[in-house]
Image (cartoon, helix red, strand yellow):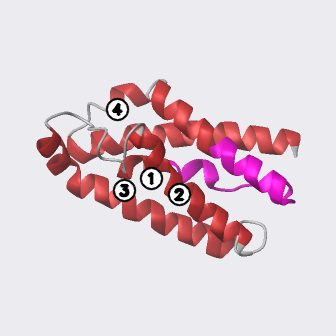
Amino acid sequence: MRPASGTWGSLPTVVLAGLLIFAGKGPAEAPGVYHAVLAAWLLLWCAGCIFEGQAAEAVYGKKDPSQAVADETAGQVLPLLALPAASLSSPTHIAGVLMLAFVAFRVFDIVKLWPARGLQRLPAGWGILVDDLVAGAQALVVVQLVTRLWF
């Protein structure tokens, strides 16, 4: 979808996490369910990148094409992991944490701090995926710091 296809690609993961939390299957109430669903989601989209990445690059004629967003869907999982229960104590806090995870991931994905940018040179689907996983890990650090210091 345009504009900002990576942003659109990140949204399904945030919606999934929000639905789990609001359904009582969040990291505070049902951490096993929450983390299992997110882990399965992560593996599904990582596999899509790895196995279809080279084909996407061939179709769109460039490295890490913006039309392929499975990498954003996968990378967005990481900042949503291990959320402290206190940060999810009210609907307002939940919305704030989901927004923080979304924005932090998008910023790191766009800015591509070291080592993310260089990892795009990896072959085929790996180059599409790994930079977003690094951005997700960087966003995870920010989300953990903010939620543990302010909630």
Magenta stretch contains residue 85: yes
Residue to which mark 3 is pinned:
46
Q: Which circle marks residue 110 in the picture? A: none
Residue to which mark 1 is pinned:
73
Alpha carbon separation for disc pair 3 and 2: 13 Å
Residue to which mark 2 is pinned:
13
| Kind of element beneath mark 3 | helix
Which of pointers 2 and 4 indicates the residue nearer the eye?
Answer: 2
Alpha carbon separation for disc pair 3 and 1: 9 Å
Which of pointers 1 and 4 indicates the residue nearer the eye?
Answer: 1
The amino acid type found where label 2 is placed reads Thr
Which image quarter: residue 101?
Answer: top right
Disc 4: CA contacts within 10 A as few (<14), some (14-19) or many (>=20): some
Question: How far from the left and from the top, in percent, is residue 67?
Answer: 29, 43
The amino acid type found where label 1 is placed reads Thr
Disc 2: CA contacts within 10 A as few (<14), some (14-19) or many (>=20): many
Is 103 left or right of 66, judged from the image as shown? right
Q: Answer yes or no: do the residues labelled 1 and 2 have beta carbons within 8 Å?
A: yes
Alpha carbon separation for disc pair 1 and 2: 6 Å
| Kind of element beneath mark 2 | helix
**Region rendered in magenta:** 76-101
